[in-house]
Amino acid sequence: MYTKVLTIAGSDPSGGAGIQQDLRVFSQLGAYGMAVVAALTVQNTRGVKTFVPTAPQLLRDQIEFLLEDVKPQGVKTGMLGSGDNIKTVARSLERLDVPIVVDPVLVATSGDQLFEGEKSAFYQDLFPLATVITPNIHEASALAELEVKDLKGMKKAAKVLKNYGPAWVVVKGGDLDGDEVVDLLYDGMDFCHFTHPRIPLTGESHGTGCTFASTLAVLLSRGLGIPGAYEKALELMELYIRGAKKVGRGAIPANPLVLGERGEAKGLVLESLRKAMEELEALDYGGLLVPEVQVNLCEAIPLARNHSEVAGIKGRIVRWGDRMRSAGCPAFGVSRHVANIVLTAMRFDLSMKAAMNVKFEEGWIPLLEASPLDVASFSRKDEPIEVKEREGSTLEWGVNQVCGRLGRVPDIIYDRGDVGKEPMIRILGKDALTVVEKAKMVLDLVL
Ligand code: PXL
């Protein structure tokens, strides 16, 4: 059975916020989305030109007629546009006994107003019904009528807002300065704050508030409580923001579609490795490239965060006469070393999702250096002692060094090894087939 979730919010024609984004979040999380439009905005990615709140009577009719027929398992309210609309929505939601997320939208990220009339309707009428309210710093300041500048201010505001009756207050700290973001959760008893790194975006972000609130609504509808739902929503937000893409000339919307892409990629990556493996096994003299520790070839799904999101060849790739041969099938979570290389390279360039290790021969280096391949190296002798002592962290350190120095991910990263450490060449690329193409170039050079 579907989880049915209702959003009551404004329309953003550019799609990054409001009902358009809420419905996208609902679908990506496998929920059945329903939407009541509470306001129309005239908007593109560069800003909001004007808005009109839906006439209260029409807003009421939309909600009432829907609820006569369908009962959602959760509700999110976003931009309601006017004090009258807040009252209208509150009256209709009063008799529902499902989680309600209230995102008290007042102003867009662009600075444009999204509300007219009496904001006191928020705390008098709607907050008492809320499972959670999710103000950002500006909204917390405006609604609690105090200036929030730090965690102390967030706590003060949370206390004021909690008194209006929501079960939880989540004050989002993203609009305060700093490399780290602090969010505050408050249930009237304990303050709980979560600190997380700010995810760097090249431009202005858009729709993050709507995206967070609608994600939270789905998770609460499925029976999660707060803070569990908050933590899961935060993890998803990181993916939406890291996977954000430009759609217009202005702000960059958070991108819930990454969830679908990543899900689909699980099958595609295994297929890509299978094809790449076929190419490798067909290479005459491919066996020349196999080192003592054997070979692995890995490819990650988009935005991979850990080893379970990187696939490799189970049992590695071995030398079989003059050729290479896979010892097992492509699978996720089967490589540590090569997967580490991929995960580290992706911190510099999200598109570099594949890597393979091959044998090192001193005589090959001048040939590689003279080729069109982008070649770089690190020395294990420069490795700090703390890194050496941490099992499995050398490659991360080496790849970090090289990519940090170059400001890009090269085609090849080699090192000359150390006592008890075999020297190695690693080939990097966008996907497994590209890496195999580069491996063919290496083989042609050294044969
Ligand atoms: O992010 C706040 C917001 C909410 N709802 C609508 C919006 C915006 C921001 O632009 O357009 C419809």
Image (tube, rainbow, N blue to C red):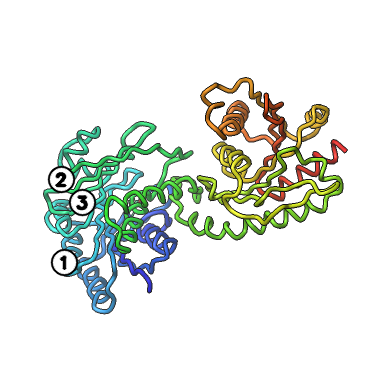
Q: CA distance from mark 2 to mark 1?
A: 25 Å
Secondary structure of the residue carrying numbered label 2: loop
434 vs 325, nearest the viewer? 325
Q: Mark 3 is on which residue type? A: Trp
Find disc 2 in the rendering and name its residue.
Answer: 189
Q: Mark 1 is on which residue type? A: Glu
Secondary structure of the residue carrying numbered label 1: loop
Side of 301 relative to 181 (left or right): right
- Vertical placement of 437 versus 225: above or below? above
Find disc 1 in the rendering and name its residue.
Answer: 94
Q: Residue at x 32, y 43 (%)?
A: 111
The answer as to whether callout 3 falls within 8 Å of ligand 1 is no
Query: Along the polypeptide, which appears first: circle 2 or circle 1?
Result: 1
Q: Mark 2 is on which residue type? A: Met
Side of 16 relative to 147 (left or right): right
Q: Residues within 10 Å of mark 2 (few under 14, many from 20)?
A: few
Find disc 3 in the rendering and name its residue.
Answer: 168
- Vertical placement of 96 versus 367: above or below? below
Give x and y (percent) for residue 29.
42, 61
Q: CA distance from mark 3 to mark 2?
A: 10 Å
Side of 395 relative to 32 (left or right): right
Q: Residue at x 70, y 39 (%)?
A: 293
